[in-house]
Image (cartoon, helix red, strand yellow):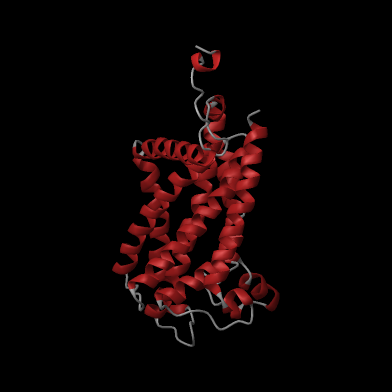
Amino acid sequence: MSAATDAAPVAAPANPISQSIRDSLVVAKRNLIRMSRIPEMVIFGLIQPIMFVVLFSYVFGGSMNIGGSTNPDRYREFLMAGIFAQTVTFATAGAGAGIADDMHKGLIDRFRSLPMARGAVLTGRTLADLVQTALTLLVLAVVALLVGWRTHTNIGEVLAAFGLLLLLGYAFTWIGALIGLSVRTPEAATSGGLIWLFPVTFISNAFVDSSRMTPWLQHVADWNPFSATVQACRELFGNPGVTPSDAWPMQHPVWASLIYSVLIVLIFRTLAVRKYRSATA
């Protein structure tokens, strides 16, 4: 018998794409199990957006002019798209703190020593954060309905709006991942994840009509990726929106929201994976 016949068959190399997906799902499952064992993480994540809904609705509702009306119910419908968007973007801080904590404890180095796809650790973490964000949005939507928020379109458009919100939240968690890999402690990641979010969310059309801002600030707000998603959700929910603007993202908010979110994912995932390789080397 020839040597070629005696030789043991060589296993075909695993498909890198399928391996990356499988490894990412394993890491995501690990993070979801961890979250379920620390329920206060989910509870505290729910309290803040619920407080924003109640405070903005009842404290500021009667003093806000939306489309020439100061009706609190009208402002409540105007507000909710902004609160939803703010909630998904604030998950960035949690994503960054979680990755920084894993780095601090040496878990990332342990993952690196395993035969797994390089980007799976970060992808798995962001997927787990996406699941948590979806649960938070579900609870928040119930609270919004209780305080008087209503949609005026069909179920398909409503689901599309929540899809855009989750895509924006997923995109921003990659920014959080990069921050978490770039700092030394979870505390620094939390601070670094929040300090830039406040201007992004407040210099927008989320809580006030951007047409009432000074011209240069209105221009910034109209081209803000956060504003595009908020405006897209208002259109899809059938809620009152801001005064019409000539800015392209405000004229085509659904497309602008998709383009912005996809670009953020592509740019910051690339940077985060590159940082992961150098930070753990």
Q: Can residue 60 be seen in this view?
A: no
Q: Which of 178 and 70 is in front in this view?
A: 178
Q: Nearer the viewer, residue 274 or 247?
A: 274
Q: Nearer the viewer, residue 26 or 246?
A: 26
Q: Is residue 38 above or below residue 68?
A: above
Residue 161 image-quadrant placement? bottom left
Which x, y percent locates residue 28? Answer: 43, 40
Q: Nearer the viewer, residue 200 or 124?
A: 124
Horizontal arrangement in the rendering, residue 6 relative to residue 198 (left or right): left
Image point (56%, 60%), residue name: 261
Image point (61%, 61%), residue name: 199
Which x, y percent locates residue 32? Answer: 39, 40
Q: Can residue 88 be seen in this view?
A: yes
Which x, y percent locates residue 118? Answer: 57, 35
Residue 205 image-quadrant placement? bottom right
Total number of numbered labels? 0
Looking at the image, the residue that sits furthest to the left is 146
Looking at the image, the residue that sits furthest to the bottom is 68
Q: Is residue 178 above or below residue 68?
A: above
Q: Quadrant of the C terminus?
A: top right
Image point (55%, 26%), residue name: 106
Which x, y percent locates residue 166? Answer: 45, 58
Looking at the image, the residue that sits furthest to the front is 1
Q: In this view, does 146 lie above or below 276?
A: below
